[in-house]
Each structure stands twice: as structure tokens, then as C-alpha cells.
């Protein structure tokens, strides 16, 4: 009886650990909750979009060749902090659409829909909290401006 109990206990612990592991997504199949940011425009009209998921995965999409690649993930606690900050800052409620030749954007995707904040016009700047949030996101990817 004791011999059977040890493997069953090991199996139960392994199953529990496996169940707690976060889901890994692919570029082709992403969840609906995302934070997207990036830049577009210029001579080529190229758009670069970064996608942060709640589990910490980060993807990069480039419009010119339609490629999406996975970047090194951040810790899930950091990702959770970014999603929490976006909610606290009420970024999904901001309506700001002032593109320029070179534009930056921030999108909040969730079950209720998608909010897109766009800036680039020298005559209009978004709230400082949007710029600060964007800067932190850029640091997550170590992406150049």
C-alpha cells in the first residue's frame, strides 16, 4: 500500500504543477486581452507593433514583411503590473488621435473592445501618463524608438 501511495502522491504533485503553468500562445493564436504599442509612418510607412500578453509573452510584428516574431518574455508579475497600471491609469478611456509623419500608438485590448491612442503631430501631445506608460513598455523590449 505504501509503495502505491508514493507514486500517486508524485503524480498528484506533478499534475498540480502542470496545471499551474501559464498557457503559452503563438503569434497565430493570441488571447483577446493584450497591450499593443509601437510606431509607424515615415518614408516607407513601416509599422512596428509590439504585443504584451498577461502571461509575459511579447511579440513583435513588422508590417512591411508581415512577420511576427516572439521576443524574450518578461516575468508574469511584470506583465500583470503593466495590465494593472493600464487599468489604474484608465488608458482604455482615453480618446486621442493625432498622428503625424512618424506616429506612436498605444492600444488596450480586452473583452470590451479595443482602445487606440495615436500621437505624432507636433501640435498635439497626449497626457504625460500615456507617454510614461509607452516609455516603460519600450524598456520591456529594449526596442529603439
Image: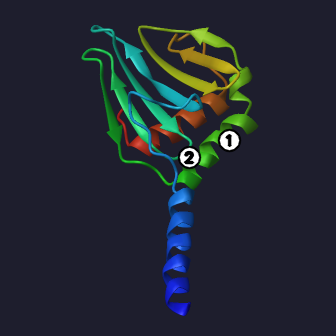
Residue placed under numbered mark 1 in the picture: 85
Q: Is residue 72 visible?
A: yes
- Quarter of the view holding residue 123: top right
- Quarter of the view holding residue 84: top right
Secondary-structure class at tag 1: helix
**Disc 2 residue crowd, few under 14, some 14–19, many 20+, Cα 10 Å:** many
Q: CA distance from mark 1 to mark 2?
A: 10 Å
Q: Is residue 2 above or below residue 77?
A: below
Residue placed under numbered mark 2 in the picture: 79
Name which residue lies at 63% across and 40% down: 83
What colouring method underlies this structural image? rainbow
Name which residue lies at 27% across and 9% down: 44
Quadrant (top left, top right, bottom left, bottom right) of the C terminus: top left
Q: Nearer the viewer, residue 97 or 86?
A: 86
First of labels 1, 2 by sequence position = 2
- Quarter of the view holding residue 82: top right
Secondary-structure class at tag 2: helix
In the image, farthest residue toward the bottom: 2
Q: Is residue 145 visible?
A: no
Q: Nearer the viewer, residue 36 or 20?
A: 20
Tags 1 and 2 touching, CB below 8 Å: no
Please indicate whether residue 64 sits to the left or right of residue 35 in the image.
left
Name which residue lies at 53% across and 41% down: 136
Please name which of the two marks, 1 or 2, marks the residue nearer to the observer. Answer: 2
Q: Is residue 5 above or below residue 145?
A: below
Name which residue lies at 55% across and 92% down: 2
Amino acid at each position: 500500500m505504501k509503495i502505491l501511495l508514493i507514486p500517486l502522491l508524485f503524480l498528484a504533485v506533478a499534475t498540480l504543477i502542470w496545471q499551474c503553468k501559464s498557457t503559452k500562445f503563438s503569434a497565430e493564436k493570441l488571447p483577446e486581452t493584450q497591450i499593443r504599442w509601437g510606431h509607424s509612418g515615415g518614408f516607407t510607412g513601416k509599422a512596428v507593433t509590439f504585443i504584451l500578453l498577461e502571461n509575459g509573452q511579447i511579440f513583435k510584428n513588422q508590417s512591411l514583411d508581415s512577420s511576427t516574431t516572439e521576443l524574450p518574455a518578461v516575468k508574469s508579475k511584470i506583465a500583470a503590473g503593466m495590465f494593472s497600471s493600464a487599468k489604474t491609469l484608465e488608458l482604455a478611456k482615453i480618446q486621442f488621435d493625432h498622428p503625424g509623419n512618424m506616429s506612436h500608438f498605444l492600444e488596450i485590448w480586452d473583452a470590451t473592445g479595443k482602445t487606440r491612442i495615436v500621437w505624432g503631430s507636433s501640435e498635439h501631445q497626449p497626457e504625460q501618463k500615456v507617454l510614461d506608460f509607452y516609455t516603460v513598455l519600450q524598456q520591456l523590449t529594449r526596442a529603439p524608438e
